[in-house]
Amino acid sequence: MTEELAARAEDPYLWLEDVTGEEALAWVRERNERTIAAWTGSEEFDRLRGEVRAALDSDARIPFVGRRGEFLYNYWQDAEHPRGLWRRTTLESYRTDQPDWDVLLDLDALAAAEDENWVWKGAAVLRPEYRRALLQLSRGGADATVVREFDLEDRAFVPDGFTLPEAKSQVSWLDADRILVGTDFGPDSLTSSGYARLVKEWRRGTPLDEAVTVYTGKADDVLVRGSHDTTEGFERTFVRRAMTFYTTEAFLVADDGDLVRIDVPDDAEVDVHREWLLVTLRLPWTVGDVTHPAGSLLATPFEDFLAGGRELTALFTPDAHTSLTGHVWTRNHLIVSTLSDVRTRMEVLTPGPDGWTREPLAGGHEFETADVIGTDPHRSDEYLLTSSGFTRPTELRLGHVGGDVEVLKRAPAFFDAEGMTVAQHFATSDDGTKVPYFVITPPGGPQGPTLLYAYGGFEVSQVPGYNLHAGLGWLSRGGTYVVANLRGGGEYGPEWHQSALRENRPRAYEDCAAVARDLVARGITSPERLGFRGGSNGGLLAGVMLTRYPELFGAIVCQVPLLDMKRYHLLLAGASWMAEYGDPDEPADWEFIKRYSPYQNAEAGRPYPPTLFMTSTRDDRVHPGHARKMVARLLELGYDVPYHENIEGGHGAAADNEQSAFMWALTYTFLQDTLTK
């Protein structure tokens, strides 16, 4: 028996991994038709889809901006421009209720002219002139993009400018005539994860195949990327090699082209700003007689460190309740964000001749998350700060360190939160760990069904924030909404994340089950009235809840999921996640993975709750074959499971607001109908 036949004998649904194969897409269309017929014909569905679409398209939304030089830039989608407008305005105009926007690119017009399904993926603008940009455009929302050079003054693509065909590319300006590029250069130029293995310097007017190699990674690396810092007086070029999802080597490219390694632990993250090097630790690091704990933020002069100096200043040291969530530079200051039992705290740190000083940054409300979304580190100490809570719409403020803070924009309330309450509770997991979760309750208490959302992976924290689709689709219809902070996330720093890696992955699943049980024990809900939703890694979590803990839930929505953990590393970007889950080709790793892998653990005759599976054909991060095969397997076992696959959408499962509104209306209609029967 050939290797292919043997694989098909073990997995009869391998044919569904052929993303655009005729047979596979015919299966998808048939399943879509059944789901649409069953769940989208009601007045309630149409009403909810209309409400979500109206909110997503509302002109009252905050047009979030980022500063580049004298202008504030924004990407905007609405009903008239579903693909979007790239535009800019001045701060003076932005302060008004109706800013005067200067449109740089109309993506709808471009898509129509070129007969392409373009989705915006961002722009790298060359400073300090801010005239040229490298635009990244995706077909249908995929991670892979086309790169094209654009002239912001002429509002046109540059003839014979820098252009790259569709690939998972990384680009960075060196100067007006040179860029750093990592892309698909041909055979052996990509890693096993499908990302760039090479960084090259490409000069204007020369063929791409004549670009000069700056660095070559290894085939089994996750990716290699180059970047250039254009700060006047501190111009530097860097190369980063990611060996795994959590280990990286960083190099300074010297003037002669030699690479100088920044000698920190592989699991640490580095940030260089002007004369300073910042080091964020994932594991303890002993330097001299001092051991800095995991989760610490350290600072030292960059040139001194390269010369061998190791005088490190601890800017943040974690404790049992507090973790570092991020930091960002202004011209002269460092803004540090932390979580204390999943509540945001922010400080301003300033280097001086006598060391670092610190002051609090203006705080917010309880159960509210604040985030610095932009600074002007080349020129000023300006910062843009957003804040929101579960029931409090987003507010955008402009501040200057040491100066005043002004409210620039306030988003409207897209749902009526009057009388809703927010509380934080702690469940006890199987090993005694306390697991926090938030409960948002409608007026009058938890009388309707309850929906639990969780993620539990990749050091991603689930923090309070305004969620218009949950508000419209769930809370305003009498449901109670729950957000859990499982191990595997970043809510308590690296150790919280690392405690659920590889063979300890089941701890995240035990945490989720503990929250579900605690909700019942507190009288908030009952199993038959409790739903669960998760996407991506959270989709894997949903699959485990289905196959391992079916008695805890009355309905599940599983979105863009990983489910076949035997083959996840062979599909698209899956190999890049082996540091999180393990390598199923290694017998010792497969021994612990196979115990929870949903595809391998689906069985007939179990009390599986109704489950909706959702994915996207254009998702080139998590392969749609995971959801397809799981549904086919469950159908074979006798379960009637609805399935919907958006033919566009990428990993977000929707390419525009119309598709997003459909997706969320389908999600909440399924949950409401199932949990209120």
Image: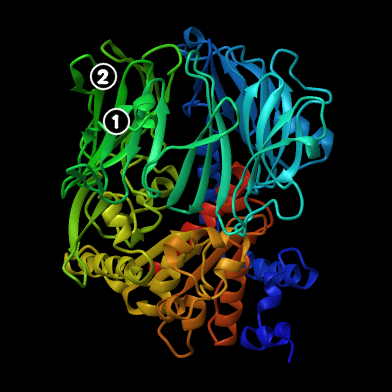
Mark 2 residue element: strand
The colour scheme is: rainbow
Is residue 81 among what the camera can see? no
Where is residue 557? Give x, y as percent. 47, 64
Viewer-closest of 656 and 359: 359
Pointer 1 with pointer 2, Cβ within 8 A: yes
| Position above or below: 6 against 335 | below
* Circle nearer the N terminus (1, 2): 1
Q: Which residue is drawn at 21% across and 72% down?
A: 430
348 sits to left or right of 229:
left
Quadrant position of residue 571: bottom right
Q: Can residue 416 be seen here? A: yes
Amino acid tagged 1? Ala
- Residue 611: x %, y % from top left: 48, 71
Number of the label disc, if any, that sits on residue 351: 2
Residue assigned mark 1: 299
Q: Residue furthest top?
A: 92
What is the quadrant of the N terminus in the image? bottom right
The one of 130 and 23 positioned closer to us in this rendering:
130
* Image spot of residue 414 (x, y percent): 42, 37
Q: Name the foreground residue: 175 vs 530.
A: 175
Dot 1: element: strand
Picture quadrant where residue 297 is located: top left
The mark tally for this picture is: 2
User: In the image, what residue type sits under mark 2?
Assistant: Pro
| Along the line of sight, the residue nearer the viewer: 287 or 646 | 287
Which numbered dot is residue 323? none
Q: In this view, does 605 lie to the left or right of 40?
A: left
Q: Answer above or below: position of 188 versus 603.
A: above
Q: Which residue is at a point 27% across and 45% down the rendered structure image?
A: 295
CA–CA distance between discs 1 and 2? 10 Å
Which image quadrant: the C terminus?
bottom left
